Each structure stands twice: as C-alpha cells, then as structure tokens.
Image (tube, rainbow, N blue to C red):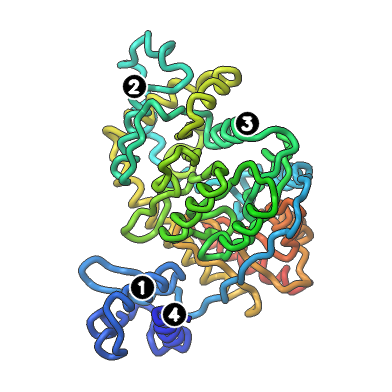
Amino acid sequence: MKRYERFAEEISELIRSGVLAPGERVPSVRQASRHYAISPSTVFQAYYLLEKQGLIVARPRSGYFVREQAQRFLNEPEMTQGHPETADIAVSELAFSVLGSLQDVDTVPFGSAFPSPELFPLQRLARSMTKGLRELSPNAIITDMTAGDTDLRRQISLRYRLAGMHLPPQELVVTNGAMEALNLGFQCVTQPGDLVAIESPAFYASLQVLERLKLRAVEIPVHPREGIDLDKLADSLAKHPIKACWFMSHLQNPLGASLSEAKKQALYGLLKQYQVPLIEDDVYAELYFGAKPPVPVKHFDDEGLVIHCGSFSKCLAPGYRVGWVAGGRYAESISRLKLMTTISPSVPAQVAIADYLQHGGYDRHLRKLRLALESQQAQMLAAAARYFSADTRATRPAGGYFLWFEFPRQVDSLRLFQMALAQGISIAPGPIFSATQGYRHCARLSCGHPWTSRSEEAMALLGRLLTSF
C-alpha cells in the first residue's frame, strides 16, 4: 500500500470502530500532517480517497467530517474478472425480459436506469421550450437539421471550453440521446464480425448494440473504484485485432468506477500506440460528488481518436432524448451516417435545452442534484449495512446513482429479481451486464430516487429474501 492509502486505512478503522463518530470532524490537514509525520499532500490524497469511499465529506471552510452513515458499511468488491477470450454476445432476450418488467410505476424502482423525475426542473424547461420556439428562425429548422440546433451546439462547446477542451461547434452532432451517438460511433469504426474491447461488467445497452451490429467482445476487468485494468487492456490489444473500445472512464455503469486523470492519460497513450478509436460513453459526467469536475479521456485526444458521447438524459431532461457526439477525426462520417438514419432530433427539445443552458441556471440545478444523489447514496448504503449480510460487498462511487452489490456466491440474482418483483421491488440482476451472462451473484441497485420509508422497507425485504439462498 502507498503511504496515503495506509493513512486512509488508519482513519477508516477509527470510523469503523466508532472512535471517530458520525458527524465528527476528522483531524485537519495540518494536524494530521504534524501528528502522523506525513506531508500535507499525502493527507489530501488520503482524504480524497476517503471521500470517494463515502466515509468523509468536505464542508467549505470547515474541514472534513465523518459522514452520518459512515460508521457501518459493507466492504468493497475486488477487481472483476473479464472473460479471457473473445465472445459472441447474446444478452438481448435476457435484458428485454428484465427491463420490460420494470415499467410499473408502483414498483420500488431500485432497477431503474434513470433518476427520479422529481429531481429535474421540468416546468422551467417547459418555459424554455416555449421561449425557444417563439424565437426560432424558420430557416434554422432546415439548416440545422443534421448537425443540430446552432445555439445548443454553441452551449455544449462552451461547456467543453470551461472544462479545458477546445471543441468547436462544427465537430459536434446533436443526437437522439447518447445511445444514438454511441451507435453512430460504432458504425463509423467497425464492420460486422469485428472485435471490440468492453468493460466487465458493462452497461447492458452497450452489449445490445454490439449484438445488433454483430460485433464480438473481449471483456476487460474493472476495479470497482479505479476503473479498467490497463495492463489487461494492453495485453488484449497486443493479442487481438481489436478495432474499437467502448469504455466509461467516469462513473462507469454499473460499478460507478472512475479512472484517475493519470490513468485516463495512460489509456489514451495505449489507444494512440495501437491506433484504436475509443467510443467514450460519458453520460454521467455532470453527476460527480465533490468540488472538482473530472476530465474525460477526450481531454488528452490530440489525434481525433476519441469519439466522446454525452447526454442531458441523466442530468437534466430524461424524456427529451437529447445527446451529442464529438467525433474527432470521425465527425464528418458520423454526420453523414446520421443524415442516412434519423436526420434530426426533436427541434423543440433542442431549443428548450439550449435556452435553459443559457438562462435557466443549469449549474445551480446540478449542484442541487448532486447533493440529493449523494444523500440518497449514503442512505442506501446505510440501509444495506443494516439489512444485508456482513459478507455482502458494495461499491461506494464518487458520484452517480448506482450501487453494485456482490452477494455471497450461493445467491442467484435472476431468482432474486423474480422474488423481489413479486413483492413490488425491481432490481437489475448481474447477468444482464455481462457478454457471457456472468455475475450471477451480483445486482445493481439505483439510489436515484428520494429516500422514503418505502425505500427503507424495500431494503429490509431484500435483506430477508437474501437469507433464503
């Protein structure tokens, strides 16, 4: 272990044992540096790690404090195991059967892929739509049809610029959600039968896209906190004729893992060495906890190898289905493909979001949303510690609204899914996140809805169901 990791472990043990109580202030950076004879930068690294693990929280001008739900928590899962060989994909039927059963609004939505609509400024967006349509130039409906609304692309370009990236509006194509962006990216760089590197576990929709396009997969293991195993990726790139990678470098679905900035740069170095394009799925970019926004792999892209895909569906307007793609060297091909398929996303949805980004207080909304999601995550983790067995493992992502649970090996999450659904609770079982339908003893739960007594009761019921295995 590195020195900062050893120090972080010392502090976490004080929290677990109750020496540092929930809500109590942890030693200041100066105090810790002096008492433990370590540098302030080491203390900062340790506290940042503890923040990512959900044990402490920074309060402006006050220091770091033990989170209210931090005293009891489940251990973190270990590195996942990717499939060592290439694999054909056949997951759609399983995924459709699971997802089709999650539509009942009376079901506790732990299996949902979206946060609660209550967390979004839908009325303010409606006013933006009215205003945007009133001011819309009739000619713009035609001239902006394929690339997308000019004002919206300008606002997206501005947000890239604020994140330290110069991506002109001309490189951006507005899409029908991120899924269209990701589909267009893959169609640009692959042919049926090609091999693609994906994470393991992976977002089920990515597996469905690969299955539809008749692509084959090589699974790369993922650490639940630190992201993909770059050594395994390098080995796979050397052994196999991989034509593209599809990775979530930040808040990966379903684990919530995030690559450090150094690992993102190293990942890009590998891609550049082998000249393999990356489809970077970055739909959770705005849902980070803490003060510092992450940079994507696209930040390091000096050869146009990264096809960066984003969306407003998870952070602002889920029903509007507005995403975008920054295509790098593939931008023109993506634009042509779009012209041959859907041509244009909804114009009213585009102008609504463009006006909201400019006048609606988007960053204020995001701050409020992040605080809500962080609180809901803490409540779900605390409930899991109360009701699930001590040998259950759980992730503690530094953002987003998903938690990955690794249950004892005898648990069958597909059976658990059916049992829970019969009791009015949805979950997302592990096999839908695997090209080979692995992770049978795992499940993804969403903490994207406000925590209520019903949520608490559902976790308690899940705990009782788990004891039947």
Residue 15, visible in the rendered structure: no
Residue at 48% from the left image edge and 59% from the top image edge: 259
Q: Mark 2: few, some, or many residues within 10 Å (few <14, many ≥20)? A: many
Q: Mark 1: few, some, or many residues within 10 Å (few <14, many ≥20)? A: some
Mark before the other along the chain sequence, 4 or 2: 4
Mark before the other along the chain sequence, 3 or 1: 1
Q: Mark 4: few, some, or many residues within 10 Å (few <14, many ≥20)? A: few
Q: In the drawing, what numbered circle is on residue 2?
A: 4
Mark before the other along the chain sequence, 2 or 1: 1
Between marks 2 and 1 in the image, the one whose residue lies nearer the viewer:
1
Residue at image mark 1: 45
Mark 4: secondary structure: loop
CA gap between label 3 and label 1 equals 41 Å
Q: Where's residue 342, x and y in %? A: 57, 21
Q: Is residue 443 above or below residue 205?
A: below
CA gap between label 2 and label 1 equals 45 Å
Q: Is residue 360 left or right of residue 313?
A: left
Residue at image mark 2: 132
Residue at 73% from the left image edge and 39% from the top image edge: 211
